[in-house]
Image (spheres, grey):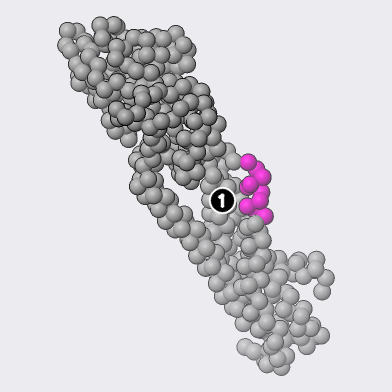
């Protein structure tokens, strides 16, 4: 039998008994759709997950500073050091800051004390922070050395009794500053009690502030942290002295996050494999049922001269067509899932990766069909002619 005739007969048999195959088709289709979605969107999902790891203990955040012990000469970071760190592979961004542990301010005659950070325009992205209302200051604010301030939510509440304070004026070291925003979101930690001003403003106007003495660095993924941390001293040494340099990584939180991610991935992939295996078992079951229900048909074909190889090829082709049809349906469901996920996370993967996953899914489906259909096909091809014709 020619290949074209074989496929036509197989497809006709599937359509004729389609109600019998729906459960198997759905199982394989769901497994294929899950496989395509996870592989296609895995990189973008991981990117977004790492971007929001502030909620999981700042696992991809590295803090770089100088040891302040008397035995070390006081040092500060150059702007060129930050640029060198930004060029390291695996680094999303870096921010130069200065910390002042105690500043005095006032509002309507009421004095308050707080910690202050002078930060650059990258600080918010590096630390995964967002404004409740208002906006963060920009590179232009840094350049103009504006007297603007952003307050942590608890600091704003303690000063004003509320958090909606955009546009209010407060005095810091006897100079007026305009509040442009209040920090919002979970995972802020101690930042809820901090005041933030542009780095250049802090260096020029806040008494007792030393030059920039901290760098916060955000890695792209948790897998990059272990690669980036050892490279930091060398990158900084290339542009300035590094006596007493400290690189602080939250290794415990990082290992915990990696363990959680590993178990989640294991669960997802195990579910997909289990679904495909169940689909394969389903193909085996329905093909065995098909062989039994068509025993007399097989006997008649053999009596008319059909060879064992032709009988085996027909049932094997039906199994493969069944799995491929399910895979095509799964590819369509996978495409819908990828599009919906892309809209949710505001990121769209390349079409090449999706097409590669579809092709891989089809190859897996062919292998599944052959593996599940080989035994029923052998059973059909080995039937005795007389016994098959007499079968009721």
Q: Secondary structure at mark 1?
A: helix
Residue lying farthest to the left in this orientation: 110
Does residue 173 appear left or right of residue 219 in this picture? left
The residue drawn where x is 57% and y is 57% is 32
Where is residue 133? Give x, y as percent.
35, 20
Q: Is residue 343 or residue 310 the one in the foreground?
A: 343
Residue 97 visible in the snapshot? no
In the rendered image, the quadrant that contains the N terminus is bottom right
Query: What residue range appears in magenta?
Result: 350-359
Where in the figure is residue 79, as x and y percent of width and height? 48, 21
- Compare residues 6 and 91 and report the one nearer the observer: 91
Dot 1 crowding, Cα within 10 Å, few <14, some 14–19, many 20+: some
At 71% from the left and 65% from the top, the residue drawn is 11
Indicate whether 112 appears above or below 23: above
Left or right of residue 268: residue 377: right
Residue in front for this viewpoint, 343 or 75:
75
Identify the image quadrant of the C terminus: bottom right
* In the depicted structure, whether residue 23 falls above or below residue 190: below
- Residue 205 in the image: x percent, y percent? 34, 9
- The answer to whether 247 appears left or right of 111 in the picture is right
Res 123 → quadrant: top left
Residue bearing the label numbered 1 = 39
The image quadrant of residue 302 is: bottom right
Does 223 appear in magenta? no
């Amino acid at each position: 039998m020619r290949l074209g005739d074989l496929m036509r007969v197989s497809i006709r048999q599937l359509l004729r008994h389609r109600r019998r195959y729906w459960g198997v088709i759905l199982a394989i289709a769901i497994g294929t759709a899950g496989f395509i979605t996870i592989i296609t969107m895995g990189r973008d999902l991981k990117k977004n997950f790492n971007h929001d790891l502030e909620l999981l203990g700042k696992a991809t955040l590295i803090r770089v500073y100088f040891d302040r012990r008397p035995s070390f000469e006081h040092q500060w970071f150059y702007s060129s050091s930050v640029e060198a760190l930004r060029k390291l592979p695996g680094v999303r961004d870096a921010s130069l800051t200065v910390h002042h542990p105690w500043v005095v301010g006032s509002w309507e005659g009421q004095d308050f004390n707080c910690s202050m950070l002078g930060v650059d325009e990258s600080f918010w992205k590096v630390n995964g922070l967002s404004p409740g209302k208002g906006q963060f200051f920009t590179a232009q604010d840094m350049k103009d050395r504006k007297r603007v301030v952003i307050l942590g939510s608890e600091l704003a509440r303690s000063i004003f009794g509320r958090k909606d304070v955009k546009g209010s004026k407060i005095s810091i070291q006897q100079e007026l500053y305009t509040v442009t925003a209040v920090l919002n979101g979970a995972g802020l930690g101690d930042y809820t009690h901090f005041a933030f001003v542009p780095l250049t403003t802090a260096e020029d106007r806040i008494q007792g502030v030393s030059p920039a003495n901290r760098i916060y660095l955000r890695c792209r993924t948790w897998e990059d942290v272990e690669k980036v941390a050892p490279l930091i001293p060398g990158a900084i040494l290339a542009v300035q002295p590094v006596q007493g340099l400290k690189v602080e990584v939250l290794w415990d939180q990082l290992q915990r996050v990696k363990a959680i991610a590993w178990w989640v991935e294991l669960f997802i992939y195990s579910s997909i494999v289990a679904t495909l295996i169940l689909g394969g078992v389903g193909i085996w079951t329905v093909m065995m049922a098909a062989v039994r229900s068509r025993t007399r048909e097989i006997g008649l074909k053999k009596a008319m001269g059909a060879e064992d190889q032709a009988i085996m090829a027909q049932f094997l082709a039906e199994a493969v067509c069944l799995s491929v049809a399910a895979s095509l349906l799964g590819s369509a469901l996978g495409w819908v899932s990828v599009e919906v996920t892309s809209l949710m996370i505001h990121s769209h993967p390349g079409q090449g990766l999706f097409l590669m996953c579809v092709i891989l899914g089809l190859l897996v489906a062919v292998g599944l069909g052959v593996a599940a259909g080989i035994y029923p096909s052998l059973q059909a091809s080995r039937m005795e002619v007389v016994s098959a014709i007499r079968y009721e």
